[in-house]
Image (cartoon, rainbow, N blue to C red):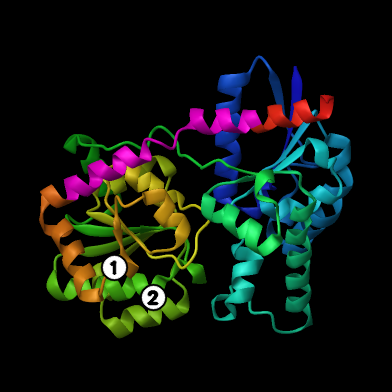
Amino acid sequence: MLTLSIYTDYKEDRWESMDLYTNLLILSLEKQFAETIKIRRSLAFENFSSLCRSNKYIRYIFRYIINPLTAPCLQGDINHIVDQSNAHLLRRLNPEKTVITIHDLIVPLWEHENPSFQSEPTKGTLSELKHRIKMWRISSLIRAKYLIAVSEATKTELVRKIGIEPARITVIPEYVENFFQPIKNAKALDPIKIKYGLPDSFILHVGTCAPYKNIPMLLQIFSEIVRQNSNVWLIKTGSPWANKHVRLIRKLGIESRIKHLGFIPRKDLPYLYSLSRCLIFPSLVEGFGLPVLEAMRCGCPVVISDTPALQELVDNTGITIGRRTMAQLITRINRILRENNQRNYFGKIGQKRASYFTAKRSADKTYQVYSKMITAQTN
C-alpha cells in the first residue's frame, strides 16, 4: 500500500475553497482507492493556537518557515501539494514524487499585470516585500515535474507565464458535493425563504468582493434590470461589500433592492440556487469558477463574463456578458426573470453540462497522475 501525503493549508488561513478542494479530494480518493493508498495530512502543528488565527505574521512564520522545515520529514511515497500558495514546498520535497495542484495565478501574477485591481497595492517597503515573497513562491512551480491544473485556461497560464512544459501538466477539473441538485419541492424551499427573508424574484451572486470579481459590473447590470423590472432583488452571499461598492450602490439608487446574507452553510446553497432566477458572475479572471458549477448543478441559469475559465466551464450553456451590448444582455436576463420556459431551458442545458464534472472522474485522473509518478520512480 502506498502512502499519500497531502500538504494542505492551515485552517487558520481561512481559504474555504482550498479546504473544500482538499476535503473532497481526500473523500473521493478514499472511496475509490482505499485498498491501494493510505492518505495522511502532512502539516506540522496542524491545530495551532487562536493566537495564530488572529496574527497574520505568526501565520507567515508557520507558512514560510515551520512548514517548509518540517515538510521533508512528512513525505510519503507520493506527495500532493493541493494549493499553489504552498508552491515554495517544492524547494524542500522530492520533485520526482511530488505533484502540485494549481487553481489559478491571480495572486500575484494577474494582480501584478493589472495594478488597479490589486487587493493590496504594492506601495511601501512592507507591501513590496510581500509581493516579492509571492513572486518567489510562485516561481517555485518551475521545479515541479508533475502539475495538475483545474482548467485548460489555468494550464495555458502556466505555460505562458511560468514556462512550464505542457506535457508536465494534467488538467483535472474541480467538482462539488452531490447535494448540489435542483430542489423542486415547495415545502422544502419555504423554510429557507423564511430563514433568509427571500423575495419571490431575485438574482444571485455567490462569492467574495475581491477586485477581480468585478462587482461594479454586477451592480451596473442589476441597476439596468431594476429599471425594467421593479420587483426583482439582488441577493448576495459571501464576504460583505467593500466601501466603494456601498457608495456605488447608493449612487445607482438600488440599496432598497439588495440584500446581503453573509456567509451561509453550504448545504443551504442548493436552495438559494433553486429559488434564484439566475446567477450573475462577471469575474475579470477565474481559475475555474465553483459557484458557477454549483448553480448549474442545481438547474440555475448562469450569466458569466467571457473570461476563458468560465467559458470553458459553461461551454455555451449560459449567457455571456461580453458578447452582447448592455441592452441585449438586459433583454436576455429579463426573459429569464419573466418566462419560466426560458429559465427552465438554460437550467436544463446547464445541468447537463455540469454532469460532466464528477468526483469519480477527477479521482480517477488524479490517481493516474500518481501511478505515472510511481512508474517513473521504478524505471
- Farthest residue to the top: give it: 35
Q: Using the rendered image of the protein, determine whether residue 147 is visible from the camera's viewpoint.
A: no
- For badge 2, the amino acid type reads Pro
Q: Using the rendered image of the protein, determine whether residue 253 is visible from the camera's viewpoint.
A: yes
Residue density around tag 2, few if under 14, some if 14–19, many if 20 or more, within 10 Å: some
Q: Residue at left 50%, top 72%?
A: 211
Give, as a single range, the part of the protein colored magenta: 343-368
Q: Earlier in the sequence, mark 1 or mark 2?
A: 2
Check residue 127 for magenta coloring.
Answer: no
- The location of residue 343, given as percent across then percent down, is 18, 50
- The location of residue 213, given as percent across then percent down, is 46, 66
Q: Quadrant of the N terminus?
A: top right
- The location of residue 115, given as percent across then percent down, is 59, 79
Q: Is 16 situated left or right of 162 in this image?
A: left
Vertical side of 108 occupied by 152: above or below: above
Check residue 350 for magenta coloring.
Answer: yes
- For badge 1, the amino acid type reads Ile
Q: For residue 321, what is the image quadrant?
A: bottom left
Q: Which residue is mark 2?
A: 216
Q: Quadrant of the C terminus?
A: top right
Q: Residue at left 50%, top 30%?
A: 361
Q: Residue at left 79%, top 30%?
A: 376
Q: Residue at left 14%, top 60%?
A: 335
Q: Main secondary structure of the magenta part?
A: helix
Q: Which residue is mark 1?
A: 258
Q: Nearer the viewer, mark 1 or mark 2?
A: 2
